[in-house]
Image (cartoon, helix red, strand yellow):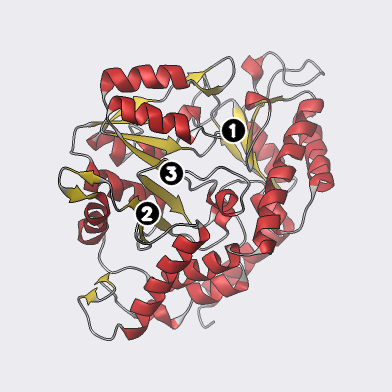
Amino acid sequence: MKDKQIEKLIKAEEKRQKKVINLIPSENYASKDVLNALGSILDNKYAEGYPGKRYYGGQENTDKVELLCEERALKLFKLHREQWAVNVQPLSGGPANLAVYLGLVPQGEKVMGLPLSSGGHLSHGQQVSITGKVWKQIPIVMDLKTELIDYDKMKEDAIREKPKMMIVGFTAYPRIVDFKKCREIADAGGALLMVDMSHFAGLVAGGVYPSPFEYADIVTTTTHKTLRGPRGAMIFSHREKKVGDKSISTMIDKAVFPGLQGGPHMSQIAAIAVALKEADSANFKNYAKQVVKNARALAGELSKLGWRVISGGTDSHLILVDTWMDGIRSTSSGRGGVPGKEAEARLEKIGIICNKNTIPGEKRSPFDPSGIRLGSPAETTRGKKEKDFIVIARKIDSVLREK
């Protein structure tokens, strides 16, 4: 590389990634094939529009790439093109979700989503997001005793508030979501049901987390995280579902382009296609199983060591740990709790990377919350098993107990 400054920084980041233990659940390590496609000559081509309907010439290869990516996406999640459409052009998860809102929900209308403090995503109607400024979020309520979604209260609120769309998904909710109940609640409130499976898409592909497709009208996902691809996104929509007399698939496509973006990133779409093929394999299914086993091993050992794991454990790839515990105690030593920001910083000093995170019923600032979020996808990619995560849990315990 002629640009030595950037080359130096890339090498420094490569070195950093190799020497740390990465427990951020939304990060992973893409294969060399994915990275090669991402940095390919396809980046030179402007492909504004959709296959067969481009606004520039010279699309004989880009059309094939995009259609192949779509085919692989549908095949991986066992969907039929007659029933489901998929848009692989969104540049990332937030814009993908925004496209669904823009296409299907009139401005100013209500949507129902899990608040950030309870494990939801910014783009699920959080006030600081454009989705919360243009649309009004009706929060999905947590039962603070069980630290699980309160489906009864969710139904009560949906019937009373009648949101136009219900967004189900999470960035920090460790348990399985009951998609069947969500469908029933959405129907009771007259809402569309959108599932954001960005965090658990790879687990669905691997058969270790329930598929939302039987119940959802729309499913969005990023393509990194547990799916282990490049940073990108996809929107699946049921072809038979309509708003008025219009197909939601058509409305979503128009919202992506020309509503929100111009030309798609064809190198990114090619890299997504590579990742989807990799995920459609026995090796990936074994990987997904190990991701859940490792997360449970981490949660179990931290619980044994005296830490409060939110909801008592995990069904997925992530766990939340209350390191603050109201500032009264966080370990058997009886010392005061460790705020999330401090816990994150302490762990990074010894090479364990995680993120501070709010917990249900959060009483502290989101900039210095009560807990940390830990995940198993990246280190499982590196070959770690349950015994390794038990060792990691003990390291975490040792560091956070220090006075």
The quarter in which the C terminus is drawn is top right
Across and down, in percent, residue 55 comes to: 20, 76
Whole-number angstrom distance, CA of label 3 to CA of label 2:
9 Å
For label 1, the residue is 175
Residue 309's label in the rendered image is: none
**Above or below — where is 102 with respect to 322?**
below
Determine the residue positioned at 25% across, 34% down: 135
**Above or below — where is 334 with respect to 61?**
above
Q: Give the amino acid at mark 2.
A: Ile
For label 2, the residue is 235
Residue 266: name its quadrant: bottom left
Determine the residue positioned at 41% across, 66% down: 70
Total number of numbered labels? 3
Determine the residue positioned at 56% across, 56% down: 227
Any part of residue 379 in sight: yes
Whole-number angstrom distance, CA of label 2 to CA of label 1:
23 Å
For label 3, the residue is 196
| Secondary-structure class at tag 2 | strand
Viewer-proximal residue among 151 and 13: 151
Circles 2, 1 touching at the beta carbon (< 8 Å): no
Circles 3, 1 touching at the beta carbon (< 8 Å): no
| Secondary-structure class at tag 1 | loop
| Secondary-structure class at tag 3 | strand
Across and down, in percent, residue 198 comes to: 48, 48
